[in-house]
Image: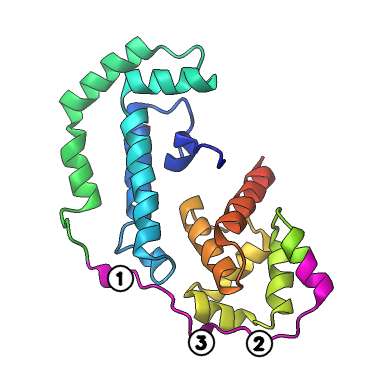
Amino acid sequence: MEKQKNYYDVLEIPPTASQEEIQQGYVRAKNAYSLDSLALYSLMTKDECDSILNLIEEAYSIISDPMKRQQYDEARGLNKDFNYHERLRASDNFKRNDSPDSKLDAQLGTDKTPNEGNVKRIVASKKFALDYQENPEMEERITQTIDYTGDFLKEVREYKNVDILRMSEMTKVSKTYLKYIEDEAITKLPATVYVRGFVYQYAKCLKLNPEMVASSYLNRIKELKG
């Protein structure tokens, strides 16, 4: 069974986040996976984006409500010394004074029907065909690997005879960011939501399991950041 998502990780906020930080995390996440996000242009299908957006909404609905948040935290042993009653009052004041709903509409945009053409599905075609000599030993390594590093991604890319320029053309990700991913240049990588999209498509183009590779790589980056 898939491990349950951590709602704080989904919104990229700490477990002790304030109401304002929760809103900011929600806005960042929504913008990152919106249909008109340039960072995801041609990277993910509409269904994939919708799935992530639904998870973002689910996370926000729980974490932004102090009572639901308390139940969520208690079930996971988080924020044991957290004053939820005080946070509830702060939440009420925040809603009255800052009108977060209207702010969210302004920050997320008022267009409820964005142009779906901005997210195009990568289709199977000659452009994405892989032409390489299979090596049983390497194929076995790929099959057995569950922890993906930048070095191993590069090794697989080169093994499958895809140079960095072609990978950039296939993924619509700049060569610079692809090299940052392979070099694990953590200080130069963009926000986590973008890295996930880039690595997801990188893996997809190499006929790897994109969900597993993206999750594994992000765990690797998290460890490197300490």
Picture layout, residue 46 above or below residue 82 = below
Look at the numbered discs 3 and 1 and tell me whether their residues touch, using CB distance below 8 Å. no
Label 2 packing within 10 angstroms: few (<14), some (14-19), many (20+): few
Closer to the eye: label 3 or 1: 3
Label placed on residue 118: 1
Q: Secondary structure at mark 1?
A: helix
Closer to the eye: label 1 or 2: 2
Q: Secondary structure at mark 3?
A: helix
Point out the image quarter for the N terminus.
Answer: top right
Q: CA distance from mark 3 to mark 1?
A: 20 Å
**Which residue position holds label 2?**
131
- Residue at position x 66%, y 58% from top? 184
Please provide percent x and percent y for residue 139.
76, 71
Which span is picked out in magenta? 115-140
Label 3 packing within 10 angstroms: few (<14), some (14-19), many (20+): few
Q: Is residue 222 left or right of residue 43?
A: right
Q: Amino acid at mark 2?
A: Asp
Q: CA distance from mark 1 to mark 2?
A: 29 Å
Please provide percent x and percent y for residue 108.
24, 50
- Residue at position x 62%, y 83% from top? 130
Please provide percent x and percent y for residue 30.
33, 49
**Residue positioned most to the right:** 137
Which tag, 1 or 2, sits closer to the chain's start?
1
Label placed on residue 127: 3
- Residue at position x 81%, y 74% from top? 136
Confirm whether residue 107 shows in the render. Answer: yes
Point out the image quarter for the C terminus.
Answer: top right
Q: Per the image, is 138 magenta?
A: yes
Which tag, 3 or 1, sits closer to the chain's start?
1
Look at the numbered discs 1 and 2 and tell me whether their residues touch, using CB distance below 8 Å. no
